[in-house]
Amino acid sequence: MRRIVVVGASLAGLRAAEALREEGFDGPLTVIGDEPHRPYDRPPLSKQVLAGAKEASQIALPVGDREALDLTWRLGVAAVGLDLVERRVALDDGSQEQFDGLVIATGATPRRIAVPEGMAGVHTLRTIDDCLALRDALDAGASRVVVVGAGFIGAEVAATCRGRGAEVTLLEALPVPLGRVLGEDMGRLCGDLHRDHGVDLRTGAGVAGFEGGARVEQVRLSDGSAVPADVVVVGVGVTPNTGWLEGSGLALDDGVLCDETTLAAPGVVAAGDVARWPNGLFGEVMRVEHWDNAIDMGAHAARRLLDGSGATSDYRPVPWFWSDQYDRKLQLAGRPGPGDQVQVVAGSVEDRRFTALYGRAGRVVGALGWNMPARIVRYRSQIATGLSWDAALADA
Amino acid sequence: MRVVVDYDLCESNAVCVGAAPEVFEVREDDFLYVLQDEPDETLRAKVEDAVRRCPKQAIKIED
């Protein structure tokens, strides 16, 4: 393999590039990114940067030994097409990049809700530029914030805006926030956390549309009521960035479909938010949008790309992430589902410092921690090697 | 190799514990403890993994 192109100047893309060099690839290596910025860390965007405690210049991802990496950066240009026969990526400035090996790490884009033409004040949060636009609006005095969607991004934005002193309404279409991820009981606790911090959380609240003139003035709900708003943040999930791969011959289904090893086609791998693959550990074809997965999958995909014989092991991680909301640190390891058994095994729900396990078919499939990080990391490695529900409860 | 943790940055996410349990421990008090300030070279790969995976970029290796 003489020439490798990484599409996506993100955490997954950068990690893939680093791993390619670590594994001894010494050919030309190009990283393409549609944002004008070098790779940066996204988690602080909904927390420290939005709060004003950190500047955008402080969240660049550390790039190990720049000289040894010897990367060619193509930033501010987006990939718009892939030709697998001619082995080239078409870019939106009309140029092309030739490759022998390709890493797809184009991430995802926030879903939007239709906004009347010309209306300002409705935001999403994914990039540095998104974050600064929202922060500018808050700095300029927007004091009534409506957050649409009480998932993890919405929850963190709500918490950060409360911390800035804004009046926050958090709208969730489902009856319980995060109910589909954490189950009803744990989801309800997340809802209580917001209410106790003075957020007006409304569940079962669908959004019908945004009203106002040049700026948004209120959010119309599907029950006909309206919530006044100076600024709106929409956090209703993301769509993987696969538009540029339409017609390329790659299998696309809510992401780039890969095999168990992250291979999408001969000489083509995918990693991070954009990749969907069968994770044998959970017997599920999954797409994982977490920070930690971008690191692991980027490195795994790099090794797979260089491995012509296919000897690379399957990619079977235990997904893990954290979310900081108010003074609580939530961490989730594994892959809980709505029908799982849930049992608190340490700490207490009343103190909001506890560990809960999720069980399915006699096996522990997830561990949720509220301010109990040490246990979650332990459970994560136990879930990786297989932990029975009975053994976990007996040990707890 | 000397392991240095910036405790102002550290949030006890405990990712380092997963990467290099010989070197890092988060105890029940939720604080991070470095078990070996100068771990053996055989642990370098694990410590480098911990450095890379720290969500707060709070760990450094000084050679």
Image (spheres, coloured by chain):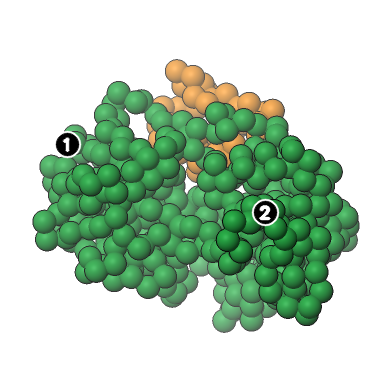
Taking A245 as reference, is B20 above or below it? above
Identify the image quadrant of residue A71: top left
Mark 2: give few (<14), some (14-19) or many (20+) Cα within 10 Å.
Answer: few
Task: For mark 2, name the chain.
Answer: A
**Residue A64 placement, left or right of A357:** left
**A33 or A121: which is nearer to us?**
A121
Q: Which residue is mark 1?
A: A27
Relative image position of residue A202 (x, y in whole percent): 80, 69
The amino acid beneath tag 2 is Ala
Q: Colour of chain A?
A: green
Give the number of the mark in front: 2 or 1. 2
The amino acid beneath tag 1 is Gly
C-alpha separation, residue under disc 2 versus residue under disc 1: 52 Å
Relative image position of residue B9 (x, y in whole percent): 65, 31
Residue drawn 52% across and 55% down? Answer: A290
Taking A129 as reference, is A64 above or below it? above
Sequence-earlier tag: 2 or 1: 1
Q: Secondary structure at mark 1?
A: loop
Relative image position of residue A16 (x, y in whole percent): 34, 45
Q: Which residue is mark 2?
A: A214
